[in-house]
Amino acid sequence: MAHNPNEFTVRGACPHDCPDTCALLTTVVDGKAVRVAGNPAHRHTDGALCTKVSRYPERTHHPERILTPLRRTGPKGSGRFEPIGWDEALDEIAARLKEIAARDPQAIVPYSYAGTMGQVQSEGMAARFFNRLGASFLDRTICAAAGGEALVQTLGGKLGMKVEHFAEAKLILIWGSNSIASNLHFWRLAQQAKRDGARLVCIDPRKSETADKCHEHIALRPGTDAALALALMHELIVNDWLDHDYIARHTLGWDALRERALQWPAERAAEVCGVPVEQIERLAREYGTTQPAAIRLNYGMQRVRGGGNAVRAVACLPALTGAWRHRAGGLLLSASGHFPVDRAALHRPDLLAGRTPRTINMVTIGDDLLRESSPAFGPKIEALIVYNSNPVAVAPESPKVVQGFSREDLFTVVLEHFMTDTADHADIVLPATTQLEHWDIHTSYGHTDVLLNRPAIAPVGQARPNTEVFRQLARRMGFHEPCFADDDETLCRQTFGDRVDFQQLLDQGFATLPVPEAPFAEGGFPTPSGQCEFFSARLAAQGLDGLPDHLPNHEPAGSDPRHPLAMISPPARNFLNSSFVNVKSLRDIEGEPLLEISAGDAAPRGIADGDVVRVFNDRGSYRCKARISPRARQGVVNGLGIWWRKLGMDGSNVNELTSQKLTDLGRAPVFYDCLVEVEKG
Ligand code: SF4
């Protein structure tokens, strides 16, 4: 067959909020992306992508892509818009922002998260723009802040094992993670370890697809992970499964932690966690007597009131047994702290020129959009610039979020690929490029390689990269600093400066960081003490408990007779948060919004499999289909997310029920700390 001269392949990186950060190979034919595959030369990707991103051409060339700037013509939320030109759109935005900034630039709030994980198209040019403007800071807490803060306080940073070494472990605890759905490439390593004789234990309230394939599943109640970790410590102590030398040389606060853990016999934890005593004792014996033992912690378990303490408690375990001595031992929650991003060069905080704007927590955007000006809060929010995020679908307590976004006096700009629930509430929508259409550079939180993303195709329609939007807005706002003229390739180079070989990225698409094989084998924790800090003086100085403890949920199971069921809302397997919900082939696999409920909870409510149910609490009500399933433990329902509201059954989704309460550390959300009741209908 003759070779088509208009067919070629381009190296890139997956931009999605997933620890795997895969290397992509996009095949382009006649200017269209026709295939996206995993790059076999990148060992972490190993030629394989998940189902979601394998459908990237379908998403990129989707008939519903936004192709031009749009101006709202109907009421907020109606989704009625008219096309306008780029100049008209940018002129109007700049005029509105100037008018507001003249009163107080803090009334303008950026709202963004990990719609793309790329350093350049996320906060590259955007941070420069908002710093120069003096807009409110956004505390980007919605996913990982509690666990991240816990790692910083315990290990000294978001650091841990190199993921590839899990393949050599003899025991793997998969804690709070449905790896098959959301960390596929780690799962391949875990399977390799299993084939070589390792034991796999899954700790998760939900009997996930991953739990199905592990040797054992511990279905604890949501928000009780710290109790389990403290009971494991108790067993390690009373059975003397401790590495006394490692504890003496590389930890801080052992005596106090020992005293705390001795208050947590397995019987007490079993009561709190709702699991058998023997299961806790067996897990402790396995963990205390198997080397190397590795823990793959993920962020699900920290979305409760005590999430930060829970991560701290789990992060103490490898130091107690000396698991860190082995390259296949220790813990991995996030590897992102290994990446030497030059944030001063990229984000240019110097453009603040001494100003310290107030900070808005993205988790409480519902409440904050409804606040008036006050000395404590600062100015009322008058403008929101949303990019890489869909807060109307993903932020907690959506009745308030929707009410806030519906304010007629709020000026909202949304940079998007599709008309999401959030875009429906915009005044102006700007068409954004996808990953196949722009430059970017990527860190990872699941491995330790830097990846470069080159554009494979020209922007679809009139779409523009986020960087270009903020560049153009800067010019119209009169921001003439030379940094606003940097092009995207320059921004990619500035991200790491000479800390990463950019030529290698251009030639190969990825570069491996020089991370030690066993980072804490000889201690060397980057905490203030240089030790693994069981006791954190920094937390104590804030008036918090310096030791990890079990903190009951804001909404503990059994505390509210009107709402007796605990609900968690893990992502549906074929969606990634709210991304991909509008990709029909993936939505067809998911079918309809589902609530998994145990047979024991369904029967007394007269609920049959497939019934439409109403899930409710005092915050709101959500209709979906019930699936009677062993995936739900008794007393807990699993509301799979995150559907777009307008694609759900009654124009809502599971966040109708979640609260804006915060975690113990990191001011993060508590999506899995939520009591509900369920009824037919
Ligand atoms: S979502 Fe995750 S597994 Fe899927 S392609 Fe992206 S990085 Fe890889």
Image (cartoon, rainbow, N blue to C red):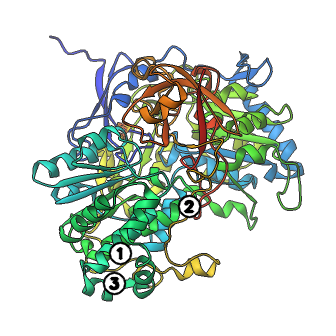
Q: Earlier in the sequence, mark 3 or mark 2?
A: 3
* Residue 370 x/y as whole percent: 82, 43
> Mark 1 near mark 3, Cβ–Cβ under 8 Å?
no
Pointer 1 or 3: first along the chain: 1
The secondary element bearing badge 3 is classed as helix
Residue topped by disc 3: 250
> Quadrant holding ligand 1?
top left
Report the side of 135 relative to 216 (left or right): right
Label 1 amino acid? His
Crowd rating for badge 2 (residues with CA inside 10 Å; few <14, some 14–19, many 20+): some
Q: Nearer the viewer, residue 259 or 455?
A: 259
Residue 629: quadrant of the picture = top left
**In-front residue for pair 538/205:** 205
Q: Nearer the viewer, residue 456 or 565?
A: 565
Q: Evaluate whether residue 297 shows in this view.
A: yes
Could you say which disc has been placed on residue 234 in the image? Answer: 1
Q: Is 98 placed above or below 590 here?
A: below
Counting from the top left corner in percent of width and height, residue 218 is at 33, 52
Q: Is residue 517 visible?
A: no
Give the residue number, with chain letter if any, for mark 2. 552
Query: Does residue 347 appear left or right of residue 296 in this picture?
Result: right
Left or right: 111 in relation to 133: left
Quarter of the figure that contains the C terminus? top right
Kind of residue at badge 3: His
Kind of residue indicated by mark 2? Pro
Does mark 2's beta carbon lie closer than 8 Å to ligand 1? no
Whole-angstrom CA distance, mark 1 to mark 2, is 19 Å
**In contact (CB < 8 Å): disc 1 and disc 2:** no
Q: CA distance from mark 1 to mark 3?
A: 20 Å
User: Mark 2 or mark 1, which is nearer the start of the sequence?
Assistant: 1
Quick one: SS at disc 1? helix
